[in-house]
Image (cartoon, helix red, strand yellow):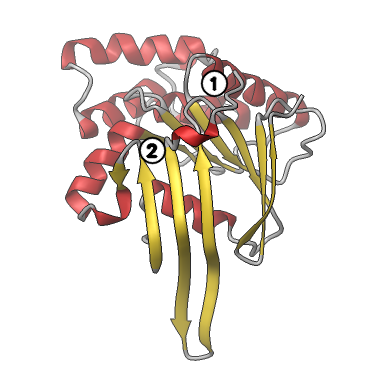
Amino acid sequence: MKNSNNSNGFIQFKQVSKWFESAAGRFDALKNIDLSIGQGEHVAIVGKSGSGKSTLLNMLTGIDHPSQGMVTINATEVHTLDESRLATWRGANIGIVFQFFQLIPTLSIVENLLLAMDLVNVIPKKERRQRAEALLLQVGIVSHASKLPASLSGGEQQRAAIARALANNPPILVADEPTGNLDSKTAIAVQSLFVELVGSGKTVIVVTHENLSDTKYDRIITLNDGAVVGDKKDLP
């Protein structure tokens, strides 16, 4: 679902910079980032290793704070929240999909989803198992609900990780190299799932090295040396 109205500022970076001090001096990971992402956009963030992609993602999710500037998501100034409020806010607003899945290996797939809901406590208890099973059905692995992660293929584990990220029905899904460890067929299936989520109103932001010539992103943001050097919108 394309959304050309990027000015609604659902996600806003205003003059965001991030630097790190070390014995060798200051390293500028992000430099004066001004960026606005609209609700319901499907966005790819690309760039070479060290370009600032992961740092930008950490600003977006509140894992790290800017050295300068503001990060606002749906009218919440994320960087101003203390750790307790930030954890609560993040759990309800952002689902994170990691490259290496990060499922808890001693819990079944459905238990991984239930734990995510228990920690945030926004889904009523009596609805949690039904919701978990519905999400696993949506991503095509409900038959594996009772299995441990190690018994699933890489693609199935990534689908489980996506279902877990959606457990609390967050408006934003952020994925860090979600297809980096998958074969091409499985990667295409995961990309198609993201398109479906955008179609249902989610904002999906993907950090990726993938070939973007045949994908369905609404927008491709390119970083280099901590700065935005490209922003292609409303792609065909």
Q: Quadrant of residue 47?
A: bottom right
- Residue 187 vertical placement versus 138 (above, below): below
Seen in the image, is 147 located left or right of residue 198?
left
Is any part of residue 140 visible from this angle? Answer: yes
Give x and y (percent) for residue 145.
42, 16
**Residue at horizontal 35%, vertical 16%?**
132
Q: Amino acid at mark 2?
A: Ile
N-term mark: 1 or 2 = 2
Q: Position of residue 223 (x, y in %)?
A: 66, 56
- Counting from the top left corner in percent of width and height, residue 97 is at 49, 37
Q: Residue at x 46, y 60 (%)?
A: 16
Residue 104: image tag: 2
Q: Is residue 66 something one can see in this rendering?
A: no
Q: Secondary structure at mark 1?
A: helix
Question: On the picture, is 218 further left or further right than 111?
Answer: right
Give the residue at mark 1.
Answer: 198
Q: Quadrant of residue 54?
A: bottom right
Q: Is residue 63 left or right of residue 83?
A: right
**Mark 1 or mark 2: which is in front?**
1
Q: How many angstroms separate mark 1 from mark 2 (CA)? A: 27 Å
Which quarter of the figure is the N terminus placed in? top right
Callout 1, which amino acid?
Answer: Val
Can you give x and y, in whole percent of width and height, for residue 133 in the image?
38, 11
Quadrant in which the C terminus is drawn? top right
